[in-house]
Amino acid sequence: MRKKNTTWVVYMVECRDATLYTGITNDLAHRLAMHNAGTGARYTRGRGPVILVFVEPCVNRSDASRRERAIKRLSAPQKRQLINTSH
């Protein structure tokens, strides 16, 4: 059994069709592998491979979920701006 990391992150990936997907996880490498294997979120299935474009650490799962909701409410240009300013 794999030991779970306790650090939660909110992340965005860019899909093959140039759309963005936002999610949370406490094991980013495993989650990206799932997206690229076609077993991650329903949205990313068939849109892979995905490329990680944004990561933001959060204090806990609750904070990560709140941040994910806030990011998902942004328009696509606003999400791109967030990605560009995070580098």
Image (spheres, grey):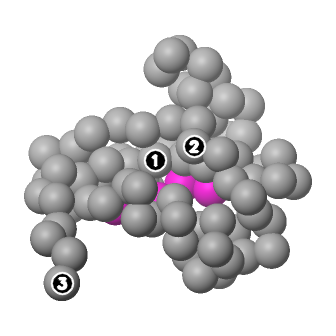
Please state if 51 lies on the left or on the right of 9 as rendered.
right
Q: Amino acid at mark 2?
A: Leu
Q: Quadrant of residue 49?
A: bottom right
Please state if 44 lies on the left or on the right of 17 as rendered.
left
Identify the residue shown where x is 18% and y is 84%.
1
Q: Earlier in the sequence, mark 2 or mark 3?
A: 3
Q: Earlier in the sequence, mark 1 or mark 3?
A: 3
Residue 22 appearing in the image:
yes
Q: Which residue is mark 1?
A: 11
Identify the residue shown where x is 58% and y is 36%.
53
Query: What label does residue 1 carry, if any?
Result: 3
Identify the residue shown where x is 38% and y is 49%.
10
Please state if 71 lies on the left or on the right of 13 as rendered.
left
Callout 3 secondary element: loop
Distance, label 1 to label 2, CA atoms, is 7 Å
**Which percent across, then down, holds residue 51?**
65, 45
Q: Nearer the viewer, mark 2 or mark 3?
A: 3
Near mark 3 (Cα within 10 A), the count class, few <14, some 14-19 or many ≥20, is: few
Residue 43 appearing in the image:
no
Distance, label 1 to label 3, CA atoms, is 24 Å
State which region is magenta: 21-25
Callout 1 secondary element: strand
**Which percent across, then down, holds residue 7?**
17, 51
Any magenta on residue 23? yes
Q: Which residue is mark 2?
A: 52
Q: Amino acid at mark 3?
A: Met
Q: Earlier in the sequence, mark 1 or mark 2?
A: 1
**Which percent across, then down, holds residue 59?**
13, 45
